[in-house]
Image (cartoon, rainbow, N blue to C red):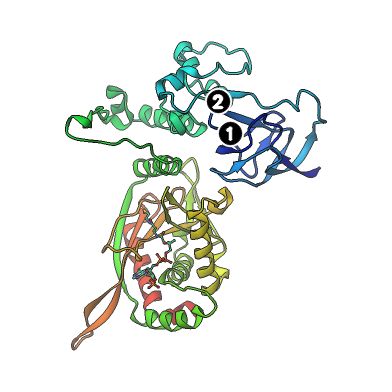
């Protein structure tokens, strides 16, 4: 077995096409002709198939990248290499031909019927007429057929309402949830909730319609799933960070010379790691059956980063082994990469616990949504000078508001309060982090 770089083949006249879907992940087994990515130009979108079969070792591009022939897609541990033949050297077939000015409805109709994958066997659930009109790529159609999903019943979250693999997965999950909940069947929507009516807002005043970004749509799906499947509780607390801030400001001045910026977030990450060590259930995930808890011995901390296109969560790996300076540098690098859309999927994988810090913006507290399959998330708001009773008088102290949301299936209320008390103690006296 050998490593091979899989590159974009000859894609005809297209000089720069945008990557709109990455269809594989590191560790996936891929067969020859399996689709790896979907790209889109002004006029067409197409899937790029694999020239070899093997295991994906590294993904070399990110969503939103503009690429051309020869660009690196991924590194593969090859199990079978296919010699170049006229057939494999053919350009990938565009699946949609359309102009930007066409309306979405017309776009859906303009979809060229899918390339024949295998003669579709009629499935009772599938309405062949609406299925054939749905706006989706051949691999998505194949996936839908395998699961018996009628594409005509789905709304796509991709660009121009294109149906993606994830839409099919969400549809199947929602259908399973609603079949467990009998109330769902009375309205046809998950959890028995009445569908949102379509409202023409222009009847009340001037409006402008803009489409959600790809990140908004993906984040929306994850947050929605977490919101409806995880019983959330939020524990509020606060920490006296007067001493920590005095130390941070001193360090910040010294570090400034080297171009390093230390914010309270780096200290919070260290204190969270210490608290996860003290309360290992917070560093766990439920397995897919929901019957076993997987406890982790590594400490990868996700940090929510706000970008113009939406929220992303890069992960600081091995945060227990990194210094405050290293963590601060990594936060900066990730924030810059996130805002330049340069984060790789691998930068956002493997998190154990997420921190969402709105401290640089404001607010007194909020209720963050657990970033599943993690079981807890810490929200941090802006610190404020407040009078604190020291036993004989009020003293001005700098207080940091903390909001810990957790999955109540895994964590009890008492442990939630113990965790935030521990965290608060660590931040109040950072010498404890050394113990
Ligand atoms: N209280 C008071 N001040 C704070 C603070 C807090 N809790 N946290 C940060 N600050 C200060 C910093 O010290 C910095 O001050 P100076 O510029 O005077 O040094 C300023 O606020 C700006 O900090 P920052 O936001 O640039 O840096 P950060 O390390 O705190 O955060 C990052 C980095 C990437 C997490 C942040 O920029 C970001 O994107 N936050 C938004 C996350 C988000 O959207 N969460 C919501 C998700 S929904 O659950």
Front residue of 63 and 44:
44
Q: Is residue 286 left or right of residue 115?
A: left
390 is higher (above) or lower (below) than 85: below
- Sort mark 1 into few (<14), some (14-19) or many (20+) by Cα contacts within 10 Å: some
262 is higher (above) or lower (below) than 49: below
Say whether marks 1 and 2 touch (CB < 8 Å). Answer: yes
Q: Residue at x 18, y 89 (%)?
A: 392
Q: Residue at x 47, y 77 (%)?
A: 433
Mark closer to the chain start, 1 or 2: 1
Q: Which residue is mark 1?
A: 38
Q: Which residue is mark 2?
A: 137
Provide the secondary structure element on which disc 1 rests: strand
Question: Where residue 411 sits: x, y (%)?
Answer: 38, 55
Question: Where residue 202 sits: x, y (%)?
Answer: 22, 31
- Sort mark 2 into few (<14), some (14-19) or many (20+) by Cα contacts within 10 Å: many
Could one spot residue 3 in this view of the protein? Answer: yes
Q: Residue at x 49, y 41 (%)?
A: 288
Front residue of 390 and 12:
12
């Amino acid at each position: 077995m050998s490593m091979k770089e899989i590159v974009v083949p000859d894609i005809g006249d297209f000089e720069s096409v945008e990557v709109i879907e990455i269809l594989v992940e590191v560790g996936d087994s891929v067969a020859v002709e399996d689709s790896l990515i979907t790209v889109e130009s002004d006029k067409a979108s197409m899937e790029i198939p694999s020239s070899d079969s093997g295991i994906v070792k590294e993904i070399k591009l990110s969503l939103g990248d503009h690429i051309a022939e020869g660009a690196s897609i991924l590194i593969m541990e090859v199990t079978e290499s296919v010699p170049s033949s006229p057939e494999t050297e053919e350009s990938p077939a565009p699946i949609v031909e359309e102009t930007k000015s066409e309306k979405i409805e017309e776009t859906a109709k303009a979809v060229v019927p899918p390339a024949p994958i295998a003669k579709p066997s009629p499935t009772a659930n599938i309405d062949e007429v609406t299925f054939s009109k749905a706006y989706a790529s051949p691999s998505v159609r194949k996936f839908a057929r395998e699961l018996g999903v009628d594409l005509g019943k789905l709304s796509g979250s991709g660009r121009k309402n294109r149906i993606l693999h994830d839409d099919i997965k969400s549809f199947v999950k929602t259908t399973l949830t609603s079949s467990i909940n009998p109330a769902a069947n009375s309205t046809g929507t998950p959890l028995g909730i009445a569908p949102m009516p379509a409202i023409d807002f222009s009847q009340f005043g001037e409006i402008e319609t803009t489409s959600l970004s790809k990140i908004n749509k993906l984040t929306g799906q994850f947050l929605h799933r977490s919101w409806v499947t995880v019983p959330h509780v939020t524990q509020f607390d606060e920490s006296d960070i007067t001493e920590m801030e005095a130390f941070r400001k001193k360090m910040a001045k010294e570090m400034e010379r080297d171009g390093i910026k230390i914010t309270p977030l780096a200290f919070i990450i260290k204190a969270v790691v210490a608290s996860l060590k003290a309360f290992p259930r917070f560093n766990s995930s439920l397995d897919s059956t929901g019957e076993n808890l997987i406890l982790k011995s590594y400490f990868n901390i996700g940090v929510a980063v706000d970008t113009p296109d939406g929220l992303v969560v890069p992960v600081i790996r091995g945060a227990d082994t990194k210094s405050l300076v290293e963590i601060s540098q990594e936060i900066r690098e990730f924030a810059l990469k996130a805002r330049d859309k340069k984060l790789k999927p691998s930068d956002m994988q493997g998190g154990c616990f997420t921190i969402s810090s709105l401290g640089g913006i404001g607010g007194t507290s909020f209720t963050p949504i657990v970033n599943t399959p993690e079981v807890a998330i810490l929200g941090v708001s802006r610190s404020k000078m407040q009078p604190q009773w020291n036993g004989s008088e009020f003293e001005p102290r700098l207080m940091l508001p903390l909001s810990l949301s957790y999955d109540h299936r895994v964590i009890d209320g008492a442990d939630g309060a113990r965790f935030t008390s521990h965290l608060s103690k660590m931040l109040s006296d950072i010498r404890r982090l050394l113990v």
